Image (cartoon, rainbow, N blue to C red):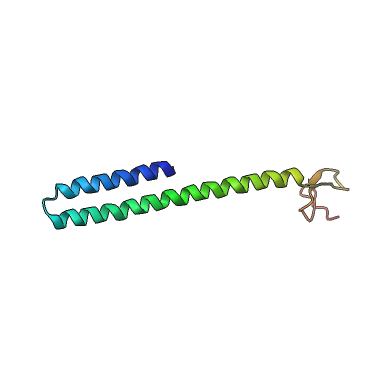
């Protein structure tokens, strides 16, 4: 998705330059080119934000995998099912040890 937004930003700049050339006046060229630069900047910024979010999600996923690996299980004395040490009561029968 971030690559798609980056490509859209580049296409926006190219279309802005072409439209500015065909506008017929220098002021028209500057206005269309400035608008395309602003639009493409938004697309580039969104691309960077999405890439950062993807990296954050990958790090959180790896931390969750590590947490699962080292998580301790408790066996409930009432229903004898296992649950995480983080829980204050058994999620199966609601017994509080």
- Where is residue 67? Give x, y as percent: 71, 47
26 or 96: nearer the viewer? 26
- Where is residue 23? Give x, y as percent: 14, 50
- State which quarter of the image contains the C terminus: bottom right
Residue at 76 percent across and 47 percent down: it is: 71
- Where is residue 17? Give x, y as percent: 22, 48
Name which quarter of the figure residue 14 lies in.
top left
Residue at 14 percent across and 47 percent down: it is: 22
Report the residue that reaches farthest toward the left. Answer: 24
Instruction: Give the total of numbered labels.
Output: 0
From the viewer's perspective, tell me whether residue 88 is left or right of residue 15. Answer: right
Residue at 70 percent across and 45 percent down: it is: 66
Name which quarter of the figure residue 38 lies in.
bottom left
- Where is residue 62? Give x, y as percent: 64, 44
Residue at 61 percent across and 49 percent down: it is: 60
Report the residue that reaches farthest toward the right. Answer: 77
45 or 77: nearer the viewer? 45
């Amino acid at each position: 998705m971030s690559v798609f937004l980056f490509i859209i930003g580049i296409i926006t700049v190219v279309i802005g330059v072409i439209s500015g050339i065909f506008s017929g006046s220098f002021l028209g060229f500057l206005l269309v080119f400035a608008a395309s630069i602003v639009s493409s900047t938004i697309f580039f910024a969104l691309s960077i934000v999405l890439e950062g979010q993807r990296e954050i999600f990958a790090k959180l996923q790896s931390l969750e995998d590590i947490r699962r690996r080292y998580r301790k299980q408790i066996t409930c004395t009432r229903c004898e099912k296992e649950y995480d040490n983080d829980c204050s009561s058994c999620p199966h029968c609601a017994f509080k040890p």
